[in-house]
């Protein structure tokens, strides 16, 4: 019995010894290694773990991975639009009590959730501004002849320049005021520039000399440029992507109809009251809209609204660690510099911005070339008076309205159709849908590319052979429709692509088109003197015809260019 007991004990003692040996080896294996721990600590400090932000950005439901160095990593999901920088926090920002965001998806303070009437009021006010300031660019054109007589000027080029220098102001203003609106908000920029526009329009009415008039015209254009770029950004602040086409079409009526209606009204005003009364009428309209805008408009820019909410909560709670969800964590100086540089980065480093700017600039330059030359040519060929010559611009107006109706009906319908098709295809393939691609805004561009040169050929040769006056007007109507489709397609494309920074994207577009709109009219009379109306307009038509393939190329390769040359740290 004892022997048996000893036999049982021995294996137990051996087992215990084996376990102790294994435990000793395990402890040695995981024993602290100071060198290894130091390397791991340095690596962790250099590359902190990424956090996942589930915050939904406007018009996007994609999850974006954000590193603590505030550099967003682009999602690999096909069809994503340009990602915006997101705020970061230690861990998931939705669990951080110091992050200030909207009070849910249906927060009425979020401009996307405003009542329809409030959105309509703001859109009407913005559209009124975007009609008024372009109206001032051409309303003065029929009175140039009287102006030249008063100041004893004989140069037709200077006569064209006093009209186009206003558009040169359109080129300078957006690069300043668009990024400022993305720093300080839309409202303060609108109110300040509205007052300045009013002041310099009055200065034009009392200008004592030709040179002072040129200076005042430039400054009026500089401050009047704001609604043309910031207006598109304001609409993007309030209207979701799938409903934005109709709103942007209504907004675009102003910048295109303003310059067209201007000469019609300006011709009769100049003939009856003199050219200075053109500016007095503009001043009265500007004063009324400035006051109305100040009383009824509201701030729309989400980062500014959330920052205001954050300040209120800091004051109320005493918690100075609160920060907006959209706060990028930059010093004020760095934030200002980044905002000012933003439209230049887009213009120089984004192929889609460059293509859009050059194509829109061509149509815009042709439009202002017509504004400078159409009235005198119609007077010369068809012997119209000053007032009646202004009616020739109605062709552009009718064509633009047709283009607006066509684009408004087609754009959102086509966007929703493509999104629905993509969703069905994704479901069949068992993947996530690509979403609403900005390229879905571009199909009307193809019609515009065909209509623009067609209208130029019709206008040029019917005027050259002195066919009935309605024939060249039909040509200008076709040009107007084509021009609007080109303008609106690229405007919507840039707004949908850059979303939060759409004002800067539109500013980069505006500067190029405004420079060409200011310079090209200076070549109008020398070109027509050398080539005549037929071949002169044919030259313009051949240039436009050479660019007809561009819409098809952008439709095919636009998404690749947009993703391949994505601009970081906007």
Image (cartoon, grey):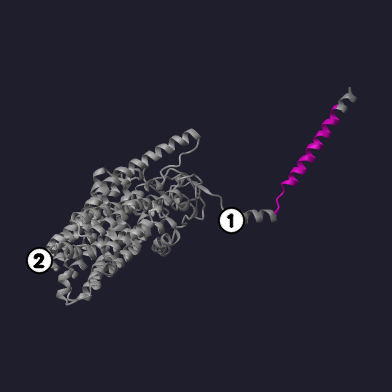
Instruction: Residue 320: say if magenta.
Output: no
Q: Is residue 569 visible?
A: yes
Query: Which quadrant of the figure has residue 376?
Result: bottom left
Where's residue 91, x and y in %? 50, 47
Where's residue 300, x and y in %? 31, 52
Residue at which label 2 appears: 273
Residue at which label 1 appears: 45
Instruction: Residue 21: say if magenta.
Output: yes
Q: Which residue lies at the image location 50% right of the left edge and 37% below the top edge?
A: 431
Q: Which residue lies at the image location 37% right of the left edge and 51% below the top edge?
A: 493
Q: Is residue 105 left or right of residue 349?
A: left
Which element carries disc 2, helix, strand or loop? helix
Where 25 sits versus 197, above or below? above
The answer to which of 465 and 238 lies nearer the viewer is 465
Where 2 sits versus 417, above or below? above
* Badge number at residue 412: none
Q: Can residue 107 be seen in this view?
A: no
Which residue appears farthest toward the front when viewing the image? 465
Which residue appears farthest toward the right when viewing the image? 3
Measure how far apart labels 2 and 1 are at the Cα level.
75 Å
Q: Give the range drawn in magenta.
A: 8-33
The answer to which of 122 and 7 lies nearer the viewer is 122
In the rendered structure, which disc, 2 or 1, sits on the residue that comes first in sequence? Answer: 1
Structural crowding at the residue carrying mark 2, measured as other residues with C-alpha within 10 Å and reported as few (<14), some (14–19) or many (≥20): few
């Amino acid at each position: 019995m004892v022997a048996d007991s000893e036999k049982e004990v021995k294996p137990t003692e051996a087992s215990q010894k084996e376990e102790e040996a294994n435990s000793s080896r395990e402890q040695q294996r995981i024993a602290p290694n100071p060198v290894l721990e130091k390397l791991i600590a340095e690596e962790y400090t250099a590359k902190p773990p990424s956090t996942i932000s589930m915050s939904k950005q406007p018009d996007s439901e994609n999850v974006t991975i954000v590193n603590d160095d505030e550099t967003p990593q682009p999602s690999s999901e096909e069809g994503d639009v340009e990602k915006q920088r997101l705020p970061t926090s230690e861990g998931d920002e939705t669990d951080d009590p110091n992050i200030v965001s909207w009070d849910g998806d249906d927060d009425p303070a979020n401009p996307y959730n405003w009542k329809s009437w409030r959105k309509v009021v703001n859109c009407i006010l913005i559209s009124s501004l975007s009609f008024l300031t372009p109206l001032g660019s051409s309303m003065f054109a029929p009175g140039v002849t009287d102006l030249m007589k008063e100041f004893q000027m004989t140069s037709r080029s200077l006569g064209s320049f006093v009209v186009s220098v206003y558009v040169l102001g359109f080129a300078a203003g957006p690069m300043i005021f668009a990024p400022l609106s993305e720093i300080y908000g839309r409202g303060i920029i609108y109110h300040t520039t509205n007052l300045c526009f009013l002041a310099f329009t009055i200065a034009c009415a009392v200008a004592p000399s030709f040179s002072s008039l040129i200076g005042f015209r430039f400054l009026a254009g500089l401050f009047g440029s704001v609604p043309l770029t910031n207006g598109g950004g304001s609409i993007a602040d309030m209207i979701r992507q799938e409903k934005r086409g109709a709103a942007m079409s209504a907004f675009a009526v102003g910048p295109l109809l303003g310059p067209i209606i201007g000469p019609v009204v300006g011709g009769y005003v100049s003939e009856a009251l003199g050219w200075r009364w053109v500016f007095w009428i503009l001043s009265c309209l500007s004063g009324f809209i400035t006051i109305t805008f100040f009383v009824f408009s509201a701030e729309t820019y989400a980062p500014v609204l959330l920052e205001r909410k954050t300040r209120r909560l800091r004051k109320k709670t005493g918690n100075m660690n609160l920060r907006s969800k959209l706060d990028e964590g930059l010093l004020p100086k760095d934030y200002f510099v980044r905002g000012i540089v933003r439209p230049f980065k887009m213009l120089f480093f984004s192929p889609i911005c460059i293509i859009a700017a050059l194509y829109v600039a061509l149509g815009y330059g042709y439009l202002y070339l017509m504004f400078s030359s159409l009235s005198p040519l119609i007077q010369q060929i068809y012997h119209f008076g000053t007032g009646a010559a202004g009616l020739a611009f109605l062709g552009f107006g009718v064509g633009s309205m047709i283009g607006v109706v066509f684009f408004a009906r087609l754009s959102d319908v086509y966007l929703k159709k493509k999104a629905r098709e993509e969703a069905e295809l994704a479901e069949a393939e068992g993947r996530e849908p690509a979403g609403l691609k900005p390229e879905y805004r571009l199909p009307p561009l193809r019609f515009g590319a065909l209509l623009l040169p067609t209208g130029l050929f019709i206008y040029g040769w019917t005027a050259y052979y002195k066919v009935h006056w309605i024939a060249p007007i039909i040509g200008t109507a076709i040009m107007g429709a084509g021009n609007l489709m080109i303008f609106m397609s690229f405007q919507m494309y840039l707004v949908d692509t850059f979303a939060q920074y759409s004002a800067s994207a539109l500013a980069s577009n505006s500067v190029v088109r405004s420079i060409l709109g200011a310079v090209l009219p200076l070549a109008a009379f020398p070109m027509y003197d050398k080539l005549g109306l037929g071949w002169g307009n044919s030259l313009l038509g051949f240039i436009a015809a050479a660019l007809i393939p561009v819409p098809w190329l952008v439709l095919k390769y636009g998404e690749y260019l947009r993703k391949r040359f994505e601009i970081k740290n906007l």
